[in-house]
Image (tube, rainbow, N blue to C red):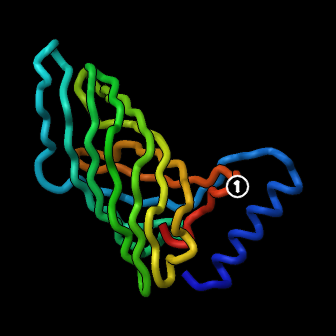
Amino acid sequence: MDKRFITTVVYSTLGFIGATGVAQAEPAGRYECSIVGAVSQDPIGDKEGHLLRGVQYSCLGVEGPVKGALYTGASTSEWDGPQGTYFTGGGIVRAAGGFAVTLLTEGTGTVIMKDGKPAGVESSGKARYKFASGTLAALSGKAVRWETKPMGVGRFSLELMTDNEPGVIGMSRQ
């Protein structure tokens, strides 16, 4: 993203906070993602439906400041029946002239059922940009909220939001 756009996003966000005094989530971009390879599901063995799940995915930015960017990531989560807790996750964002590395800091998920069968997972949490360079340098150290929704077999959307709090910024390019 160009520096004028980043500056506009930052100052608009700060102006909004100052004008309203209330923290609200705002869209900061959306990806459409596909699961890459097989999802690993390792039973923990203490009870039925308690397992560790590993997922690798690849995403294309389709809206907002992340449009056109490529994001590749992975996550590891614990599932107790239809409820999950994310332990690790993150990935690399590749945009024209820049790179960024994300790290999931927290997350939970729920299996969504359709016609009595699992149809995907809805999840949400927080992440942080641990590194960013080039056109994405302004993201380094910044935090975002994220949400996923199923889009069909092996596909999901990943939406990023800002919290409009100190240290939290929208992506100039996730």
Whether residue 65 sits left or right of residue 26 in the image: it is: left
Whether residue 174 sits left or right of residue 21 in the image: it is: left
**Residue 81, position in %: x, y?**
26, 19
Question: As displayed, is residue 22 above or below residue 28?
Answer: above
Along the viewing direction, whichever of 68 and 77 lies nearer the viewer: 77
- How many marks the image carries: the answer is 1
Identified at 53% across, 48% down, the residue is 145
- Tell me which amino acid carries mark 1: Pro
Whether residue 108 sits left or right of residue 6 in the image: it is: left
Identified at 76% across, 67% down, the residue is 12
Q: Residue furthest right?
A: 19
Crowding at label 1, few (<14), some or many (≥20) Cα neighbours within 10 Å?
few
Q: Looking at the rendering, in which quadrant would you find the N terminus?
A: bottom right
Label 1, secondary structure: give it.
loop
Q: Return the residue at label 1.
A: 166
Identified at 72% across, 75% down, the residue is 8
Identified at 40% across, 55% down, the residue is 103
